[in-house]
Image (cartoon, rainbow, N blue to C red):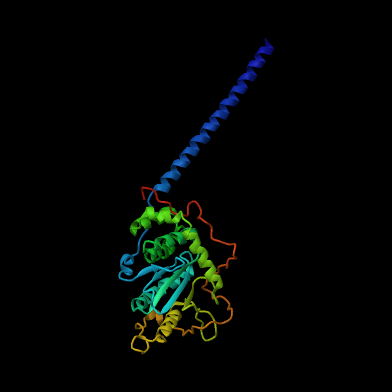
Amino acid sequence: MTRSKAAERRQERQAEKRRQRLTSLVVVVIVAAILLIILVVLSTQPADAPIPEGTLTRYEGISQSRTQDGYARLGDPSAPVVVELYSSVACPSCKVFHDAATDDLIDRVKSGNVQLIYVPLTTGSVTNANGAARTLICATEQGKFWELQDVMFSWQETFGNQAFTNNRIIAALDGLGIDTEAHNACLNSERPRDVLFSAEQDAGGLLNFIGTPTIAINGVVPVNEDGEVINDAAAIINAIDAAIAQMPSSNGSAATTPEPTQASAGTDATVAPTGSEEPTETAEPTTAPTETEAPTEAPEATATPEVTATSEG
């Protein structure tokens, strides 16, 4: 009898352990399901994606096209002065330059003397720089690069490291009227990767490239009187105006430049190549790739906007 009772107690203890394990498993499953539901809800909620006032009309009437390498071009492709911006929307120094120089650059593009080319890089401290760059490259195919660039630079200040979340980018595409089906087809193709690879190759081969932003005028990075590379807005605008002044007009005289604005008053610059210079404080460094290096084919899972039938750095 004693031996039978002991066996029963062992069986009861074993049954109790099984019940405890089962209860623990059920709790874990329930908690996991709740977390999954929360993540799904958060991932499908529209993110705040403000479009700055005037963005939708800022580039009206200005030609937008692409170069052979897939870079966004603003202005007449035959304009004599070619200004190349080696930049990244995830780079804080690039935002400073963008905010200070864009209005003056647009004025010179409108004059017909300048074509502006954006060479997209992925430097900077904001998360998902690669996803943002790929999105911009695909927006170029629908003539929305420059508007989306303005939007993304504005998000740096507003949202910091959360500027380029998946949902925020999706909301911006919708706000700018971008065809999401065509955009996703571009993202899923090799084109963004190829453009980024070309951009890194071009940056690595550019004399006096110091990181982002670096600006080249007719293929040459301007330097100041001491031979130091410059990338502040005022000096760059002065260098562009100097290049415009050297171009003959249709009647044989020098071309005219727009009236200087507040941003274009400052240090004189010389558009002439020099030897390698030390980077300025405002430049974001980047590493020139080797022949085997290439940008990641796709950004992190939360980085690249994949838009379904329905439309957060």
Q: Is residue 313 visible?
A: no
Q: At which x and y percent is residue 265?
A: 41, 83
Q: Residue at x 59, y 22 (%)?
A: 15
Question: Please, which residue is most extreme toward the top here?
Answer: 1
Total number of numbered discs in the rendering: 0
Q: Residue at x 52, y 86 (%)?
A: 225
Question: Please, which residue is most extreme toward the right here?
Answer: 3
Which quadrant is the N terminus positioned in? top right
Q: At which x and y percent is residue 282?
A: 51, 73
Q: At which x and y percent is residue 191?
A: 47, 59
Toward which corner of the image does residue 235 lie, by quadrant? bottom left
Q: At which x and y percent is residue 307?
A: 40, 51
In the figure, 141 relative to 263: above or below? above
Q: Residue at x 43, y 64 (%)?
A: 157
Q: Is residue 67 visible?
A: yes
